[in-house]
Image (tube, rainbow, N blue to C red):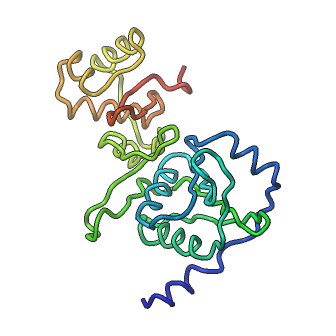
Amino acid sequence: MKEYEQYLKYSGTTTLSSMSKADLINLVERGESSFLEFKQKVASPEKLAREIAAFANTEGGIILVGVGDRGELIGLETYLEEEFWLKKAADEECIPPVDITLELFQMGQKDILIVRVPESAEKPVQVKAGKSNKLRKVFVRVEDASVEASDEYIQVLKQGGTPHGVTFEYGEKEQILFRYLKEYSVITVSDFSNVAYINSYRATKILVNLVSAGVLDLFEKDGKAHYTFSVKST
């Protein structure tokens, strides 16, 4: 596809935002978080795809383009280039594509782009890594950052994180796990493998199944998956 044909494909998809200035300021004052990201401008579709995929793999979120890292309302001279790169990132760099919506908030002579990223129904959303389509990475949102997901987190995303289709009985190893969590609150695959005298593969499988069943919650810290009792199950 020629460059001008790509531009026509991705342009004209932005609508005027119904958000008031007070609402926008209130949103910005909350600061970056697990559901909100600031971008002063669009750097490249590859980097944008990481943010989009991370929100899609978590619970969705909003990217404000034209806002500085500290919440300064800088604005964009024109939103057309950003519109093009954002749609290209969502449609071509994310696998499967993410159906983002773009809203324009007009601020005098400058604009703020409000990018709404829905939670994906088909997880994990992967991002192309390099020129080869075979190399892909998975990102998730952790607090105010988009981080690469661990293998365990990816397994949970593949299973959907829901109890549907996940059936098992609590055995000796699960009881060891529950006693450990009652005492220490948090466990890793390595911890579980050691206390239950099982290999890391079996430990991962048990933990991932319990997350998918809603018994445990999974969070990433320092590049490693950690497990706790689910708030919903307590």
Q: Quadrant of residue 189?
A: top left
Q: Residue at x 46, y 22 (%)?
A: 229
Left or right, 10 with reference to 134: right
Q: Residue at x 47, y 61 (%)?
A: 48
- Compared with residue 47, is residue 133 higher up or lower down, i.e. above or below? below
Left or right, 224 with reference to 144: left
Please identify the quadrant where the N terminus is shown: bottom left
Give the percent coordinates (x, y) of residue 84. Answer: 55, 75
Please identify the quadrant where the C terminus is shown: top right
Q: Residue at x 47, y 39 (%)?
A: 142
Give the percent coordinates (x, y) of residue 74. Answer: 66, 58
Q: Closer to the camera, 120 or 16?
A: 16
- Compared with residue 216, is residue 71 higher up or lower down, i.e. above or below? below
Give the percent coordinates (x, y) of residue 205. Answer: 28, 35
Left or right, 17 with reference to 114: right
- Compared with residue 68, is residue 42 higher up or lower down, i.e. above or below? below
Give the percent coordinates (x, y) of residue 45. Answer: 45, 67
